[in-house]
Image (spheres, rainbow, N blue to C red):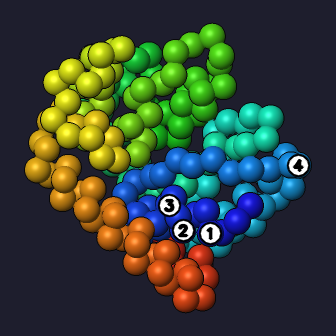
Amino acid sequence: MSDELFVQYGSPTLAGIKTGNLFTCPYTDRQETMREIRRLNKSLVPKGLRVLPLRYSEERVLLYLYRPARLEKDLSNREAVELLENAGYRHENANQCVVELIRRLNDLKTEFPHEIGLFLSYPPEDVRGFIAHGTNRGVGCKLVGTWRVYGDAESARITFEKYRKCTEAYCKQWSDGVPLMSLAVAV
């Protein structure tokens, strides 16, 4: 598991400007992957970050790099709570919601959990719009960037640019030899 992947795909979360990022990572040995995740978490947890494997496929693992405290705040938003409850989550705390998300991602009988956007700092109004449009997700969409925007396009545009600049700066620092743990900001 390459630290470079965390920089490429998780810079906004490492920098503390986003709740979480999802990305896949190749693996050959599940036990070795878990040891590597434990190693990373030993250094990341004191900085307010956590890495979880959400789903394993034959050769790849879906990783969730996130800030638990920020996720708790995001998921306590009134509209987010309503979306989660409508999707069948028992919303008592963010950890319980993450466990349910993992269950849904691994249940091949259910539809992909589109509420996942709430775990990634997407505005609840945009998650609601994405879910509401079903197979016609382009309908009513005002902007496409990190996510499909159905609400405040200007605010989203600013956020997309902030994420882009952060990723660019972090990748530059990484290529200049700054290690992952120095890029992970404690918040």
Report how far apart the C-alphas of labels 2 and 4 lie in the structure: 22 Å
Which residue corresponds to mark 3?
10
The residue carrying pointer 4 sits among few (fewer than 14), some (14 to 19) or many (20 or more) residues within 10 Å by Cα, namely few
Which residue corresponds to mark 4?
29
At mark 3, the secondary structure is helix
- The numbered mark at residue 4 is 1
The residue carrying pointer 3 sits among few (fewer than 14), some (14 to 19) or many (20 or more) residues within 10 Å by Cα, namely many
Disc 1, disc 3: CB below 8 Å? no
Task: Please name the residue shown 18% across and 59% down the image.
Answer: 158
Of mark 3 and mark 4, the one earlier in the sequence is: 3
What is the x, y in percent for residue 134?
Answer: 34, 15
* Residue 85 appears in view: yes
In the drawing, does residue 3 fall left or right of residue 142? right
Callout 4 amino acid = Asp
At mark 2, the secondary structure is helix
Q: Quadrant of residue 3?
A: bottom right
